[in-house]
């Protein structure tokens, strides 16, 4: 039987979720910023995927939505339960999960150029 192991970024992501549920006003700001970031990623990905491969489109979407990502992380950092180190540790995992979610997107036009 395999033992459960958690990596540091997963624990940081869990700390973020605790912070979001602990402070309703901050959670609203962070949730709004998260929604804006995800919307930006989705639009940029669909536009890019129409002309390039999915991997290139996902990378380009992450680059073009960096401002929205920064706003989301800034909203998270306003929580009294998180500090800058927690945010810095969680960022790579959050970005990797967002990229994986984009690549799982099946709907939308197929790439014209490959």
Image (spheres, rainbow, N blue to C red):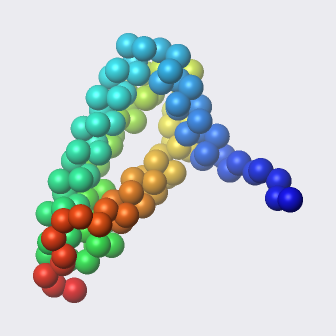
Residue at 42% x, 61% y: name it: 100
One can see residue 92 in this view: yes
Quarter of the picture holding the N terminus: bottom right
Residue at 52% x, 31% y: name it: 17
Percent position of residue 80, x then y = 52, 17
User: Does residue 99 sit above or below 16 in this rendering?
Assistant: below
User: Does residue 32 sit above or below 101 in this rendering?
Assistant: above
Which residue in the rendered view is the most extreme toward the bottom? 114
Percent position of residue 82, x then y = 54, 26
User: Does residue 31 sit above or below 90 in this rendering?
Assistant: above
Which residue in the rendered view is the most extreme toward the right? 1
The one nearer the camera, 44 or 1, is: 1
Percent position of residue 8, x then y = 66, 46
User: Does residue 98 sit above or below 47 in this rendering?
Assistant: above
* Number of numbered labels in the structure image: 0
Quarter of the picture holding the C terminus: bottom left
Q: Is residue 7 left or right of residue 12?
A: right
Residue at 23% x, 64% y: name it: 107
Residue at 40% x, 18% y: name it: 26
Q: In this view, does 48 lie to the left or right of 4?
A: left
Percent position of residue 71, x then y = 30, 35
Q: Quadrant of residue 50?
A: bottom left
The one nearer the camera, 90 or 111, is: 111
The one nearer the camera, 33 or 73, is: 33
One can see residue 85 in this view: no
């Amino acid at each position: 039987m395999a033992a459960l192991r958690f990596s540091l970024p997963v624990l940081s992501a869990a700390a973020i979720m605790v912070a979001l549920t602990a402070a309703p006003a901050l959670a609203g700001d962070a949730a709004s910023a998260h929604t804006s970031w995800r919307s930006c990623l989705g639009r940029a990905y669909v536009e890019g995927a129409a002309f390039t491969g999915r991997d290139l489109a996902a990378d380009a979407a992450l680059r073009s939505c960096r401002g929205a990502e920064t706003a989301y992380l800034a909203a998270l950092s306003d929580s009294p339960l998180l500090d800058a180190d927690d945010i810095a540790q969680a960022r790579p995992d959050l970005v990797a999960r967002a990229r994986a979610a984009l690549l799982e997107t099946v709907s939308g036009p197929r790439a014209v150029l490959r």
